[in-house]
Image (cartoon, rainbow, N blue to C red):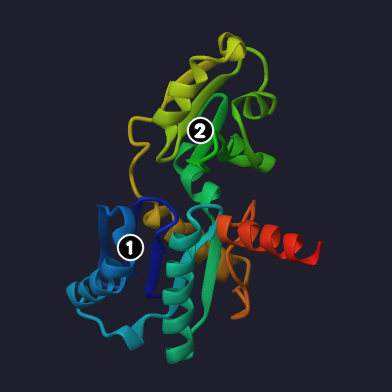
Amino acid sequence: MNILAFDSATAILSIALSSEKGYFYFEADAGPRHSELLLEESRRLIEKAGLETASVSLFACMGGPGSFTGLRIAFAAAKGMALGLGKPFVSVPTLDCMALPHGHWPGAVLPVIDAKKNRFFAAVYREGKKAAPCVDGGIPELLSLLRSGEKVLVTGPDAGLFMERLMSCPDKDDFLFVVDKDCRAGHAGHLLELAREKYILKNSSDDFGAGPFYLRKSDAELSLEEHGGQERQ
């Protein structure tokens, strides 16, 4: 089965293609250039694999949380290509993909994404399973999800920022924090693995009306609500 996966949920853009001829991968610290690179690099991977776009069986993207713009770019690409070719698409929770390679960690795995405003999108995983729901919270709230004395692996693209902010928190010494050395790696490969599991083993795909999972409203939506409320007063 040929599967093409897009990860543009953070500043790290990654694309993975699994085909009968092998595994092909692209990654770049692309910042705001996701929309420029995603389709172009996807075509290159497909060509490297000796395939045509029509031979891709399944398209996958990060389901969120993450960058509002980044998530929309990947959803638009995955849904557009899938609809145009009459193929299925699936989305997978972003934090699940970030936690996947650390299923044997002897403690808690804490993938984090900078949510701005001194907050993070995060979730806690233990023994490869999600132990607490995704949250949009500050450092104290995230620490409340952990067990005292627990060894915590911090991963995700903003693990370094999390550790910087953690230094001013008096409760940090209740835990042993370790930073994942590959925290700024892309996760399209892990997305591909979980997408295959969702589609083949769980016999599940996304509805084409589905969209990204957001833990909060965008600044534009909040601004619109604020101005709308002012006009009604």
Q: Is residue 50 left or right of residue 69?
A: left
Q: Quadrant of residue 125?
A: top right
Is residue 103 shown to the viewer in this render? Answer: no
Residue that appears at 64% across and 24% down: 140
Q: Is the C terminus in the top left, top right, bottom left or bottom right quadrant?
A: bottom right
The mark lying in front, picked from 1 and 2, is 1
Q: Residue at x 40, y 59 (%)?
A: 8
Asked whether residue 177 is in view, the answer is yes
| Residue visible at 48% across and 71% down in the picture | 75
Horizontal side, residue 61 vs residue 229: left or right: left
Picture layout, residue 37 above or below residue 9: below
Q: Tell me the residue that label 2 is attached to.
A: 104
Q: Quadrant of residue 142?
A: top right
Q: Label 1 sits on what residue type?
A: His
Q: Nearer the viewer, residue 64 or 109?
A: 64
The picture places residue 3, in percent across and down from the top left corner, at 40, 71
Q: Position of residue 116 (x, y in %)?
A: 51, 41
For disc 2, the neighbor class at 10 Å (few under 14, some 14 to 19, many from 20) is few
- The relative height of residue 78 versus residue 225 in the rendered view (above or below) is below
Residue carrying label 1: 34
